[in-house]
Amino acid sequence: FFSKTGGITIRGLLARIIKKTGLDDDLFQVSSISYGPYLIYANFMHEHDDELLSKPVWDVIKEALMHDDEFSERDSDDAKKSMPSDPLKHQTFVDCSIIIEDIESGDEMEIPPIRLVRRSKRP
């Protein structure tokens, strides 16, 4: 559930969320994970996307932030030059919103936000 480059993967986070909530993974699944306005994971789009599921969560969030900056500032050369290479570089944690789905009924419920803490690399 952890990538070779470090950090929990999307797949690992999905499993951990269900385990920590105490729900049966045969009956419930994570429907979506959001970081602010950014949809990081949605089961209807990414459920079988092994490439995304194998990526560290921090990398997926960083890509979403950078893609948004590129999109909103794509016509400005100055904006491209000033865009940080890692918009999360100085953040030690992020809070994500989670929606859980009852597989049988399709009902969704939002659980309290989860905090992902960036651990420093051990020597």
Image (spheres, helix red, strand yellow):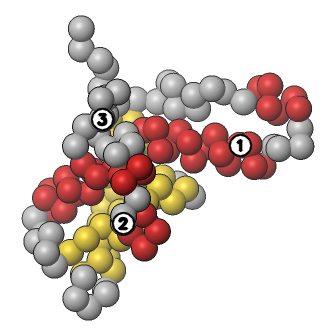
User: Local crowd at mark 3 within 10 Å, few (<14), some, or many (≥20)?
Assistant: some
| Mark positioned earlier in the residue sequence (1 or 2) | 2
Quarter containing the N terminus: top left
> Hey, which quadrant is residue 121 in on the image?
top left
Q: Is residue 105 visible?
A: yes
> Could one spot residue 32 in this view of the protein?
no
Q: Position of residue 95 (x, y in %)?
A: 40, 48
Q: Sequence order check: which comes first, mark 1 or mark 3?
A: 3
Nearer-the-camera pick, 74 or 23: 74
The residue labelled by disc 3 is 3
Q: Answer few, some or many: residues within 10 Å of disc 2's Cα (few below 14, many 20 plus, some between 14 and 19).
A: some
Q: Nearer the viewer, mark 1 or mark 3?
A: 3
Question: In the rendered view, would you say 26 is above or below 53?
Answer: below
State the SS at label 2.
Answer: loop
Number of marks present in the image shown = 3
Which mark's residue is nearer the viewer, 1 or 2? 2
Q: Position of residue 38 (x, y in %)?
A: 55, 56
Give percent across and percent down for residue 82.
77, 26
Q: CA distance from mark 1 to mark 2?
A: 26 Å
Based on the displayed image, in which of its 4 quarters is residue 25 positioned?
bottom left
Q: Answer left or right for 4 relative to 46.
A: left
**Residue 113 versus residue 34: which sits nearer the camera?**
34
Asked whether the beta carbons under mark 2 and mark 3 sit within 8 Å of each other, the answer is: no
Pick the quarter of the image with the C terminus: top left
Residue 22 appears at what percent x and percent y?
A: 10, 65
92 is higher (above) or lower (below) than 44? above
The residue carrying mark 1 is 69
Q: Which residue is mark 2?
A: 47
Three-letter amino acid code at disc 1? Answer: Asp
Residue drawn at the location 31% of the way across and 86% of the way down: 107
